Amino acid sequence: MVDVSRVRDIFAGLKREIQKVIVGQETAIDLILSAILIRGHVLLEGVPGTAKTLTVKSLAQTVQAGFQRIQMTPDLMPSDVLGTNMFDARTGTFQVHKGPIFSDLVLVDEINRAPAKTQSALLECMEERQVTIEGNRFPLSPIFTVLATQNPLEYEGTYPLPEAQLDRFIFKVLIDYPQASEENKILEKFEAGFRADKLTEAGLTPVTTPDEILACQEVVKQVKTKPTIIDYITQITRATRDSPDIQVGGGVRSSIGLFLASKAVALIDGRDFVTPDDVKKMVAPVLRHRIILKPEAEIEGVTPDEALNAIVTQIKVPR
């Protein structure tokens, strides 16, 4: 039986196991776990070498879930991701060969290196959790989750993600360099023999199963959100459409994302009710990739997070 306290214990256990391998990056781990709980997808933005791939592989191992990594390149075709019909000479028939998207956790590395037609092939997968090959529909894993990475520094040979696709990610997670003390701990781990390419030897213990994760996702429905909190969420999203620094504000999917993300925070914390602090904690991850700043704000150095923080400070917090 999975209840609120069991969900808290499972996700605390997942975080504890992942942190056996990953030093720091606590916010990123929290957001990835929250996304899994509310069936969302995550865009991870950070420079190379900040343990993005290692984090996802560690999560897959602790959940005992399937894992696939897709390295996006400019010549990658949709069929390379989704799969295709291939002729089998032995049987004289066409057989569907499923692509790497058919897994539980899918790491899409450097998603902005893929051309538009390959990026768009992910839209149906992310939104409808199914794949259409030659007119036939195939359901994806019940806990199917895309965790995509992109490099914020290198733009040569990249294809920026369109707003419609960015909107499909529940969170955009910014991953920075580790602190000096954290970097020391990383080196100490390597001195002790840890190697990222030998994750099976890292001593990670399975915490749960995909079936139990599905049960945890159902418990989200038990988390209550009072009308005053719902109004608070709506006010924040609507304020992005009137901000002097924002040219394009968040749409309705932003409100839904903030609503669900707040429930995830509460549930992982062991509560069956949402507080204003839960909402405030998730404003930036949910909205930072769904707004477009005005050119004059960008020239002045305003960041999406700063624009969102200004909005949150102006809106009265419900009691």
Image (cartoon, helix red, strand yellow):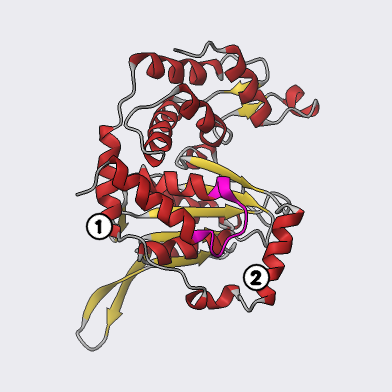
Direction from residue 301 to residue 60 in the image, left or right: left
Vertical placement of 73 versus 221: above or below?
below
Give coordinates of residue 225: x percent, y percent: 34, 23
Question: Crowding at label 1, few (<14), some or many (≥20) Cα neighbours within 10 Å?
Answer: few
Q: Could you tell me if residue 79 is visible in this image?
A: no
Please report the residue visible at 58 percent of the width from the left and 64 percent of the height from the top.
Answer: 73
The residue pinned by badge 1 equals 211
Circle 2 residue: 189
In the displayed structure, does residue 253 sit left or right of residue 154? left
Residue 22 sits inside the magenta stretch: yes
Q: Residue furthest bottom?
A: 90
Q: Which residues are magenta?
A: 18-28
Q: Nearer the viewer, residue 249 or 78?
A: 249
Magenta-span inclusion, residue 258: no
The mark tally for this picture is 2
Q: Upstream in the sequence, badge 2 or badge 1?
A: 2
